[in-house]
Image (tube, rainbow, N blue to C red):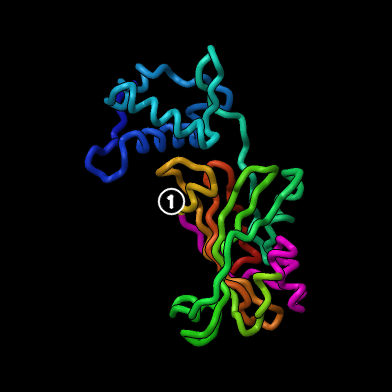
Amino acid sequence: MAKTRRIERNSGVAIWRQIADEIRSDIMAGKLQPGARMPAEMELAERFGVNRHTVRSAIAALTQEGVLRAEQGRGTFVANARRLTYRIERRTRISQALAMQVSETKGILLGSSIEAATAEIAQNLAIDEGARVTRLETMHSADGHPISIATHWIDAERFPTIAEDYTVNASMTLAFKAADLNDYFRKSTIISAHHAAPGDLRYLKLSPGAIVLTARAINIDAQGRPVQYSLTRFSADRMELSIESETVQ
């Protein structure tokens, strides 16, 4: 194989991570099919112009992330695991979106705090800058595997017990219902992709440099008032986001 042009030695991104990302791109492009055996370390080392130790680090990271699987005595193969599809619609609920794809979803409250709304948070919640907001840090898993980490900001004056309600119900929908908000809708979603932050790596069980999809979203009530501003990070190797263009603005 020819050497890959994308490897940059002074880019600030570790060489092994660049190699891992390149292999992931090959898989996503269909150049390496699910179940296919990976080329030998020496072949990959020649392709990328590195030593076998660097290639081994890239393979180990992709194996940890579930992109590849190692079989004792046989080699390393492209994993057959499929991505879960999270449909972003007018009513976006992660448990409902994944109900037909997994046996169980679970929400966990990692932490909560009361803080003053920054200009960004105030604008997205339509409240005054400096007003009290509740910040929730949550994690969702599917069939025991972590799939997302989220940070939510909610008006603390309107929903003073939202943290306690989420702790009891393990669901944002049920937590809002406990606060007499029976329905809410997605106003907007902005999606981006980037390398995971250290905290996300730990909770999502990823290796340094792994890619996450980030959804920055605003939910509103039936009167159009914002009720929730959130930043959700999904493992790009486990999840794909599908946007319903007719209902999401």
Vertical placement of residue 90 versus 87, above or below: below
Q: Is residue 188 magenta?
A: yes
Q: Is residue 9 magenta?
A: no
Q: Secondary structure at mark 1?
A: helix
Q: Is residue 244 visible?
A: no
Q: Residue at x 45, y 43 (%)?
A: 210
The front one of 124 and 14 is: 14
Q: Residue at x 47, y 21 (%)?
A: 38
Q: Position of residue 246 (x, y in %)?
A: 65, 64
Q: Position of residue 186 (x, y in %)?
A: 64, 69
Q: Residue at x 67, y 43 (%)?
A: 144
| Quadrant in the picture for the N terminus | top left
Q: Is residue 69 visible?
A: yes
Vertical placement of residue 94 versus 29, above or below: below
**187 to the left or right of 182:** left
Q: Residue at x 47, y 53 (%)?
A: 199
- Can you identify the residue that label 1 sits on? 198
Vertical placement of residue 86 versus 31, above or below: below
Kindly indicate the quadrant of the structure image that contains residue 162.
bottom right
The front one of 224 and 228 is: 228
Q: Position of residue 198 (x, y in %)?
A: 43, 51
Q: Residue furthest top?
A: 73
Task: Please name the amino acid that badge 1 sits on.
Answer: Pro
Q: Residues within 10 Å of mark 1 (few under 14, many from 20)?
A: few
Total marks shown come to: 1
| Quadrant in the picture for the C terminus | bottom right
Q: Position of residue 101 (x, y in %)?
A: 72, 44
The residues colored magenta run 165-192
Q: Residue furthest left?
A: 10
